[in-house]
Structure formats: structure tokens, C-alpha cells
Amino acid sequence: MIGRLNHVAIAVPDLAAATEQYRGALGADAGAPLSLPDHGVRVVFVTLPNTKIELMEPLGEESPIARFLEASPSGGLHHICYEVADIGAARDRLVETGARVLGDGTPKAGAHGKPVLFLHPKDFSGTLIELEEV
């Protein structure tokens, strides 16, 4: 069901500083910041030969990333995103196996404009999973 790894997301307290660290220290190709108000984040994607890194900072105090940073002020791994061919079919199959989809189960447009869903981390060894339809 799952396809390739789309990206690994890292919550950061300062997006500009994290982006510069990836560009400067690691020599990475980092894109421009993108605000995603529906998700409560501002992101920068770092392009790698085989996947992407998503650096995320909160857009306001109600952002899930703001809550994450309260527990981990220096930031850290937030989620892993896998590609799926049909997000509705993937959701239905996961629910049948007992996995919990966060929210109301309706896919939202993600950073790439494609439908995404998040799966409860307690169902996947403590890891928040994002599925993105490609």
C-alpha cells in the first residue's frame, strides 16, 4: 500500500535559522518558506537526491507544532510522510485494521497541494505518519 518515502518532517523553533543551517553547514538545496495556515505551519522543503526534509515552524500559538515545541524546545523529528496511490482506499484499509486517522478522516490539501492524512502515532510505534496521495 505505501509507496516511497516522500519526506521527513522536523519541527524547528526558528525556520530561518534552520534553513540557513541546512544550506550552509550541509550544503543543501532549500526552497523558499511556504505558509500553510490550514495546518498551522510555515515550512521549507530541503531537496535531497532520494527524498525531502520538511522544516516546520508554528504559525501561531494554536499550531500543533507550537505544542510540540513546548515539549521539545530545540525541535525534533515530527513525522514521516509516505506516498500512496489512492488516499481514500488507504484510509479505509487502515481503519479496517484498527488504525486511527487523525481529524475527521477527510483528506486536506498538503504543502504540495495533494491530499494528505495523518495517522495516530500510538498505532505506529510512536511515530506520526502522514500519507500523501501521488
Image (cartoon, helix red, strand yellow):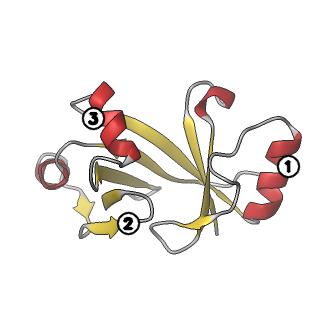
Nearest to viewer (mark 3 / mark 2): 2
Determine whether, in the image, residue 114 is placed left or right of residue 48: right
* Residue furthest to the right: 96
* Coordinates of residue 74 in the picture (x, y in percent): 21, 31
Considering depth in this image, is 113 or 67 the residue closer to the camera?
67
**Residue kind at label 1, given as amino acid type:** Arg
Disc ID at residue 93: 1
Q: Are marks 2 and 1 in contact (CB under 8 Å)?
A: no
The image quadrant that residue 120 belongs to is: top right
**Residue kind at label 2, given as amino acid type:** Leu
* Coordinates of residue 19 in the picture (x, y in percent): 18, 54
Q: In whole angstroms, how far apart are the C-alphas of marks 2 and 1?
A: 28 Å
Tag 3 residue: 75
Q: Can residue 76 be seen here?
A: no
**Residue kind at label 3, given as amino acid type:** Gly
Q: Earlier in the sequence, mark 2 or mark 1?
A: 2
Question: Looking at the rendering, in which quadrant would you find the C terminus?
Answer: bottom right
Nearest to viewer (mark 2 / mark 1): 2
Q: Are marks 1 and 3 in contact (CB under 8 Å)?
A: no
Label 2 residue SS = strand
* Coordinates of residue 47 in the picture (x, y in percent): 35, 61
Compared with residue 87, is residue 54 higher up or lower down, i.e. above or below? above
Considering depth in this image, is 116 or 8 the residue closer to the camera?
116
Q: Earlier in the sequence, mark 1 or mark 3?
A: 3
Q: Which residue appears at 35% of the width and 36% of the height?
A: 67
Label 1 residue SS = helix
Q: In whole angstroms, how far apart are the C-alphas of marks 1 and 3?
A: 32 Å
Q: Residues within 10 Å of mark 3 (few under 14, many from 20)?
A: some
Considering depth in this image, is 42 or 24 the residue closer to the camera?
42
Disc ID at residue 36: 2
